[in-house]
């Protein structure tokens, strides 16, 4: 009976099939024509496709889907903790924490065609002083990669710096969470005007090329292209002369 029941339920196959099917789903954010902070670092060709609302063919796969789902669950947990910790009086400041705060309606986001949401925003207010705003960014990692983290990754800094620019934050608090040991590494990074200028220059170049009927050059990378939704459109390895 038990063997027959297990064969009927077959959770391994059914869950694998469920996750495999996720690659066929195209979300509204996939074709909204916006630049998303998580995708601005690295290859600029994909930004051209994003602007043109090219429909992606996801290549994330079963294993990485599980990793993403685990990460999303961890984010929910960390954001819930932050909401409780930074909600009230703190050494003379009144603090609030806002999770999943969108930036799309800000001046900079509209100017540079950006859309997205930060993991959180900590706001500290005190009478007679300017409010202090701090972006919160959570990153989960396995023990093997977490052990080598001694500072935030450059692509994470660029992503969070975009949120800081749009929301007027002076710093970013990074929370690198070890999925195996439940330990944290925290880093505070000040907002960088220089990095923001570099980001806006890149986005401006992408937009200008499109208005001229051109796309940004392909940037082949076996690691990045492996999961890129625009791989079948771009086919970078066939255009190594770009």
Image (tube, helix red, strand yellow):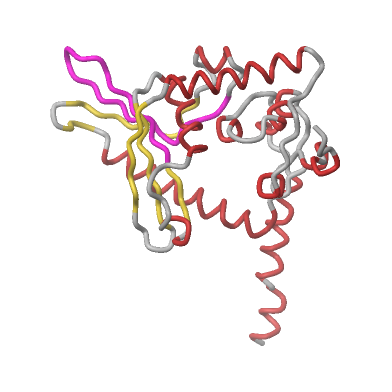
Our reading of the magenta stretch's main secondary structure is strand
Residue drawn at 29 percent across, 41 percent down: 84
**Residue 69 as seen in the image, left or right of residue 190:** right
Q: Is residue 96 above or below residue 209?
A: below
Q: Position of residue 219 (x, y in %)?
A: 71, 36
**Quarter containing the N terminus:** bottom right
The magenta segment: 115-137
Residue 19, picture quadrant: bottom right
Q: Nearer the viewer, residue 23 or 234?
A: 234
x 47%, y 42%: residue: 153
Q: Is residue 238 above or below residue 165?
A: below
Residue 70: x and y, percent?
A: 52, 55
Q: Is residue 11 above or below residue 206?
A: below
Residue 145 located within the stretch drawn in magenta: no
Q: Is 132 in the magenta?
A: yes
Quarter of the image with the C terminus is: top right
| x, y percent for residue 151 | 39, 44
Pick out the residue farthest to the right.
238
Q: How many marks?
A: 0
Left or right: residue 144 compared with residue 237: left
Q: Give the left or right position of residue 57, taking residue 183 as reference.
A: right
Q: Is residue 71 left or right of residue 27?
A: left
């Amino acid at each position: 009976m038990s063997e027959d029941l297990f064969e009927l339920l077959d959770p391994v196959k059914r869950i694998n099939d469920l996750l495999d099917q996720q690659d066929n789903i195209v979300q509204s954010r996939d074709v909204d024509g916006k630049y998303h902070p998580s995708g601005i670092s690295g290859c600029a060709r994909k930004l051209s496709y994003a602007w043109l609302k090219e429909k992606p063919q996801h290549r994330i796969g079963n294993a990485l889907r599980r990793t993403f789902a685990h990460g999303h669950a961890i984010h929910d947990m960390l954001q819930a903790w932050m909401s409780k910790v930074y909600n009230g009086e703190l050494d003379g400041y009144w603090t609030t924490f806002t999770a999943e705060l969108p930036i799309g309606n800000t001046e900079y986001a509209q100017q540079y065609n950006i859309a997205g949401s930060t993991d959180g925003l900590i706001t500290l207010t005190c009478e007679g002083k300017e409010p202090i705003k701090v972006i919160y960014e959570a990153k989960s990692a396995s023990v093997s990669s977490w052990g080598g983290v001694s500072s935030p990754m450059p692509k994470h800094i660029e992503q969070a710096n975009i949120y800081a620019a749009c929301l007027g934050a002076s710093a970013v608090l990074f929370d690198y969470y070890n999925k195996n040991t439940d330990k944290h590494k925290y880093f505070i990074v000040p907002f960088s005007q220089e990095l923001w200028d570099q980001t806006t220059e890149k986005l401006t170049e992408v937009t200008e090329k499109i208005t001229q009927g051109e796309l940004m050059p392909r940037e082949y990378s076996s690691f990045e292209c492996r999961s890129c939704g625009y791989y079948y459109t771009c086919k970078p390895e066939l255009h190594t002369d770009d």
